[in-house]
Amino acid sequence: MRKIAMVLLIFVFVLPGTASAAGLCCQLSSGVQESLLGVASPDPQKLSLQLSYSLTVMDRLREGSSKRSLDDVKTAGRYTALPTKMDMTKYTLTVGYGFSPKFRAFVSVPYIRNTMDMEMGMKKGMGTMWSSTKMEPVQEIGDITVMGLYRLYTDSDERPANAFTIGLGLKTPSGPSTEKTASGKYVHAHMQAGTGSWDPLISLLYTKMMNPYLLQADVTYQLTTRNHEGYEFGDSLAANLSGKYAVSGQFNITGGLTYLHLNKASDNEGKYTKLTSLMDDPANTGGSSIWFSPGVQILPSANSLIDLKVQFPLWEEVNGTQLVSSYRVLAGISFSF
Ligand SMILES: [Cu+2]
């Protein structure tokens, strides 16, 4: 679920801006690849700084590709701890530097706040008594990621029409993955601020510029590893097709389609597993989804970019029964120096 963070979709408003020479072609030559990394890419010898906010709202239940109501899942009788709403908020600071026209590198540091509402069932005589509860929020620095982007091919250094880029990254285990609840049990694995694992990432990007249009196809694979506690979040694959249309030098309309696949998690030592709790049954992890992304971008000045985005799932198929997202909102501002 946290890996939905890899998926980006776009929705932005107009803000009053000063005149700017930065249009779509300049964004390409400076390599803004927000559908991949959500960061403004720095020009050579330039530093970029991005602050972003994202909110993922999960408040629907799904079994396979079918919708399920809370009552459906209660009646099925398998679980006595059910999530009803999870809000995942993330503030991310990303710093990038252009070492050369071909090579740029980024470090991103997220601050995570996850909340969850649940329904707990107590067996009473013939039936089950349900009560609502809120979990203690998790608020921590999450997993820091470093990534390098190397441009393998371009037809021109100035305003290229085609560019092919490879990215290699590493997600570190800087965020805590062993937070406990007041009862001394581990908080749900997917609610922890970190995964506790070192995960390599590889991305391939193809960008095509046909002023005033920009098209980009990119794919990212995250190879997850097992953490110290024996838990492994599933590998993920995200493939994006996105486009931008420059209405003016200060305003772009954007859109995209994203396919996301997550493998099932596995919990070798059972430390995070509780088979009567829907969130703590590893069978209820992983799946595939397709997301749609309309949006806009604003360029208030030559060295800044504002990005507000919303993403909606068009199709989903999950393993087991899971709490799934209704939508995701993203807002970011980036500067280059
Ligand atoms: Cu919970």
Image (cartoon, rainbow, N blue to C red):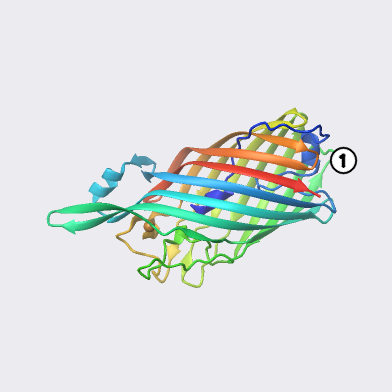
Residue drawn at 47 percent across, 60 percent down? 138
The part of the image, by quadrant, that contains residue 225 is: bottom right
- Horizontally, is 302 left or right of 62 in the view? right
Q: Does residue 225 sit above or below 6 in this rendering? A: below
Q: Quadrant of ligand 1?
A: bottom left
x and y percentages locating residue 128 in the rendered image: 19, 53
Location of residue 132 with respect to 255 vertically, above or below = below
- The residue nearer to you, when weighing 139 against 310, is 139
**Dividing the picture into quarters, in which one does residue 251 lie?**
top right
* Image coordinates for residue 184, horizontal then vertical, percent: 37, 71
Image point (50%, 66%), residue name = 177
Give me the residue at 78% from left, 48% from top: 336
Instruction: Look at mark 1 in the image and give the residue it sits on.
Output: 158
- Answer above or below: position of 151 versus 296: below
Judge: label 1 CB < 8 Å from ligand 1: no
Q: Is residue 188 left or right of residue 169?
A: left
Residue in the image at 68% along x and 44% along y: 333
Task: Residue at the far top: name it.
Answer: 247
Q: How many marks?
A: 1
Secondary element at image label 1: loop
Q: Nearer the viewer, residue 301 or 27?
A: 301
Asked if residue 26 can be seen in this view, the reply is yes
Question: Residue 164: where, in percent of width, then height?
Answer: 75, 45
x, y percentage for residue 25? Answer: 80, 35
Q: Is residue 37 visible?
A: no
Using the image as rendered, state which of residue 53 and residue 103 is in the foreground.
Answer: 53
Indicate the amino acid at tag 1: Glu
Q: Is disc 1 surrounded by few (<14), some (14 to 19) or many (20+) residues within 10 Å?
A: few
